[in-house]
Amino acid sequence: MGGTKVSARARLAAVGLGRWGRIMASAYVNSEAVELVSCFSRDAERRGRFAADYGCGEDESLEALLAREDIDGVVVTVPNDQHAPVIEAAARAGKHVFVEKPVAVQVEHVKRIQRAVAESGIVFACGHSARRLAGVREMRRSLDSGELGTPSMVEAVFSNERGLELREGDWRGDPAQSPGGPLTQLGIHQIDNLNYLFGVPTRVVGVGRKGAPRVANTMVVGALLEYDDVVGFLGTDWLTPGAFTMDLYGTRARLRYELDFSWWSDSADTDAHARLIKVHIESDSDDPDARILSEQPVQLAARNHLREEVEEFGRALRGQAQVEVGLSSAVANVAVVLATARAIEQGRAVDIAELQSELSI
Amino acid sequence: MGGTKVSARARLAAVGLGRWGRIMASAYVNSEAVELVSCFSRDAERRGRFAADYGCGEDESLEALLAREDIDGVVVTVPNDQHAPVIEAAARAGKHVFVEKPVAVQVEHVKRIQRAVAESGIVFACGHSARRLAGVREMRRSLDSGELGTPSMVEAVFSNERGLELREGDWRGDPAQSPGGPLTQLGIHQIDNLNYLFGVPTRVVGVGRKGAPRVANTMVVGALLEYDDVVGFLGTDWLTPGAFTMDLYGTRARLRYELDFSWWSDSADTDAHARLIKVHIESDSDDPDARILSEQPVQLAARNHLREEVEEFGRALRGQAQVEVGLSSAVANVAVVLATARAIEQGRAVDIAELQSELSI
């Protein structure tokens, strides 16, 4: 029984041991679904510290790590522009891949990743954790149950102050590496949430603003996302205190979701620092001035958005689960990011199909 | 002294005695700045009831009312498409005009009103009351004082359920009479608020959706308003429970304003049913994951948005005040409405200057 129990846990290795790699490891290190076996970073000091802190082994090269027989999959949190080569190497070695969002932002990289995954048949998951927030799950449930009535408008905002501290030369300040600035880093989470709630939009228009004198990249993005029946607004701003909000407007009720961004990376506590408010007409009347609105908090059962996505990945590569956000969803999200960046740059409405076509292999 | 006291109050007459005319009268009838002398509606029963309810006289024709020497100005709440002829008649008679928003939505009507006002030299005020809400005044103060730092993004939403009950033939369902549907009826309030906070935008793109099977008009509008440094979102939706919100994002703090729309027309109590929340980084750190956001309510001293605007009009025609929202502001707001409607219809970005040029005399 002991042997069975050990092998039932998917055996993972962390590749990329920076800030986000550590946050992810903190979320899944004690999971019963996955086991952190090893880690790799080119930086030996960083690697040793990670191995000590999370109680795993370490490998001195990516090749050595990928050659190990006791590793089933890798959790990749290297910078975006290294996703393609790392995923290609993992796929060649038959290792399953969990990769942080965005899957990639360069068209050729997105294609390389799709080819590598298709040819190898590995399990692939992308870290769009925000849809696993309890409030986002509840919004989806409210839509599916009909409690909101017919939805007509949605606003989604994800902003923080990180643009204010960008240094010259930071890759996030480079439009090629982070198209639309916060759009690639933050807005993509809301793009995935909107895709989760309403499907892929058909078209986008956008407006961008720079704002940091020494940084070439866009710092503020507003976009209108068109769905068949719903009008969507996406706002993402790198020049303001953290904000993660969604407003969903239906004929029967509207929902307001607010997350305290301070708790974003403490995934066991994120949901405890979020609220979902439902507003509906409590007392109706033929006289519009006599109608009374009511505002009620919706109870949310706490989840763990980062742990869940890695555990699902682990179970999927044991055949015990389906990956919710696989490669096609990840590519659809990038299509919306790139369409929005293009809409801003070219000052025109851009069909998402235009980008999906360019990204397809 | 008695005689002086009476003549110090501006003597007004109500023209248009429907729902909004009554709401306005309720707001100003006991004012020390204005006196409600008479009223007019073609509907004699409605007129008699108004006169009885608000303790004023009544006139059997607009001509008779405008010929009276004991009336200084008129408060006009007739349907939008009657604004131009009523204002022209008032201006010819030398009566000052307060008119409900929008000043007019047909280009030729806007021009006629501008000519009538220019030629007569009357005092003119337009009922954009929302900027007088305590929370909106406080947002402006926070911008002016620098407490928010540099603003980069703003969202403004005004929605309600009125589109769900539109009947065939209602003028609000006609795109010519209410361009953009809720855009003309609700969104224009937020357009004025945005103009108040950031000036007139340079350009707009928009997306609209219909949604009621028997109604030709747009029911949902999303628009991006471009300012020099700020990206604005305007949302206005006629298919959802009442919502009046603004989110203002600055480098040092952000503000969230929410008004309980149930209390919109009870202007003495509107501010008591609104809240303004300020979010800033309370505890800063070099480690972004250690930063703590703080959320605090901002105290608002209650005002009375509808009473104030009529009192200011009354004082202005006694030479004791300046009208804050005069004809140029009212026309600028209509320019943004019509530019947005055109942007939606033609699927392109529209310069506000294009409309301002078309509307100028």
Image (spheres, coloured by chain):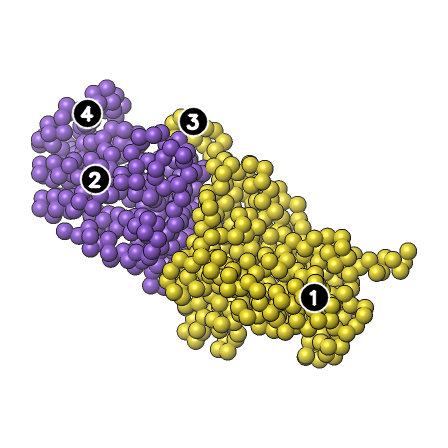
Chain colours: A yellow, B purple
Q: Residue at x 34, y 50 (%)?
A: B344
Camera-side mark, 2 or 1:
1
The amino acid pointed to by label 4 is Arg
Label 2, on which residue? Answer: B98
Up the image or down, A151 lies above or below B63; here it is below
Q: Residue at x 63, y 52 (%)?
A: A132
The amino acid pointed to by label 2 is Phe
Label 4, on which residue? Answer: B42
Q: Same chain, marks 2 and 3?
A: no
Task: Give the camera-side residue of B124 and A247.
Answer: A247
Local SS, label 2 = strand
Local SS, label 4 = loop
To which quarter of the image does residue B90 belong?
top left
Camera-side mark, 2 or 3:
3
Mark identifier at residue A285: 3
Q: Is residue A23 shown to the viewer in this render?
A: no
Q: Residue at x 14, y 44 (%)?
A: B112
Answer with left or right where residue B358 lies relative to residue B247: left
Circle 4 chain: B
Cβ atoms under marks 4 and 2 closer than 8 Å: no
